[in-house]
Image (tube, rainbow, N blue to C red):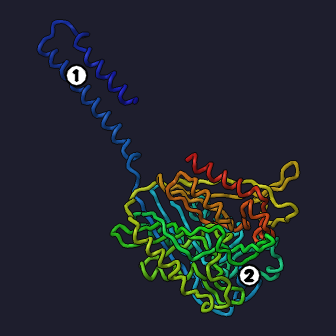
Amino acid sequence: MHTAKRYFRTKTLMTNRPKIMDFQITSHSRFAVLFNWFTLQFITVFLLLTIVTLRVPAQNPAKFRAAVVKVDITPETSQNLLGYGARMSIGTLDRIYHRIIVLDDGNTQFFLISTDICEFSPFEYDKVAAKLKRLYGIDPVNFWWTVTHTHSAPEVGPPGLGTVFLGDRFLHETDTSYTAMVEQKLIDGIKAAREKLEPATLGVGWGFSQANINRRAVDVDGKASLGLNPDGPVDRRIGLMRIDKQNGSPLALVANYPIHGTVLGYQNLMISGDAPGIVSEYVEEKIGAPLIFVNGAAGDLAPIYSVYPSAKEGHLGQFRVLLGDRILEANRKITTDIDALKMVSGTVTVETPRKPGLGWSADLSSYARTTRGGDHLVRLPVNFLVINDDVAIWSAPLELFCEISNEIRARSPYAYTFYFGYSNGWLGYLPTASAWKHGGYEVETVCPYTPVAGKDLTEAVLGYLQEK
């Protein structure tokens, strides 16, 4: 608008100039007038072209780049396995990994890590995030560390809220040497990924798998217990993001699906990635590129074969068909035609009441607050990543009930809305308000919240997405 106004004034001035100079003009003076007139026209056009040229970069975003790294973190010594009661590993069924992907839109670098472990404390995330900030200047809002939630992998870092809920499982010392190895390999992997960035294209899509089932079995007395509930709420959608190299060959595939890593039960003492790990290895063999498996709202969802003593009895290999083949089918339908994108990351802290009488872990003081009136609150961090106008990803350090994620996805203004669970730590289970009347493990034992938490979270997430 300002450019047009300047141009109009210049044109008016030059149109009137001959009238101002209305006297007898010699051939010499006539030449001078024409020379000055053409000079002013040239300068005007030059300035206009300069303004247009300076504005072009804002209209043409930088080309999208990406890189992926897969790092083995399988221990060589016996480890305490996390997910059931305390127990030590006696060997390895299948190897476990960090899978690291970096996305670069020309202005922002975003790092997503999926690790084949059960969970870790937000204290551990903060520790690693601080190192990455100091070493590489990575803003924590752009560093998301998720887990596949296998219950057959070693502990990493201090237990955090685990000691508040299930203190008898954590009477042993944490293996600090294994934790240090996991941390260092993650940091080194991020450095390696940054050095491998290359032009890429992005595609997004949906898939469907019936590999999971609601696990809140409700008896005639209305009491819930861990089991199988085929009539219960479920989320069977697979969210997919595929990244291809510039030549069209696959660079990486991100698959978001909610499923507990509990095909193998507490009797199993072999290290394993469980269903997410088996599926990841299978898909990688088929596509020739890493699969970054990101768990979703699996708080009330189990695999359809759950807590078996061995891989054979639990039909672990069948998940290659139940979930792996469904990922491959959906992947084949994706077109990767996005070669320029804009990423916007953000974070919101949701404060919601803490369950009355519940203690708190001393190393998680920044995740709690006490009001002047003496009310205890949980400070729940929720992170967001919006890609262009179609994709919105939100994450939280939760075992979230699928109904909450389903509602947010249904009401989101974005065509592709994904929830990345178990991200940046673990702050317990967050059930729906309706789940409280049935009680059960998820409500009574491992939940630090009250029945209003689901509403508080839903309103905060939708408020953020609808304002963007």
What separation in Å lies between label 2 and label 1 (alpha carbons)?
86 Å
Residues packed near mark 1 inside 10 Å, few (<14), some (14 to 19) or many (20 plus): some
- In terms of secondary structure, where does tag 2 sit? loop
What amino acid type should be assigned to the residue bearing mark 1? Answer: Trp
Quickly name the residue at label 2: 84
Residue 263 visible to an observer of this rendering: yes
Quarter containing the N terminus: top left
Residues packed near mark 2 inside 10 Å, few (<14), some (14 to 19) or many (20 plus): some
- In terms of secondary structure, where does tag 1 sit? helix
Give x and y (percent) for residue 27. 11, 14
Q: Left of 118 or right of it: where is 290? A: left
**Against 451, is 117 above or below?**
below
Quickly name the residue at label 1: 37
What amino acid type should be assigned to the residue bearing mark 2? Answer: Tyr
**The one of 333 and 46 positioned closer to us in this rendering:** 333
Quarter-wise, where is residue 423 in the image? Answer: bottom right
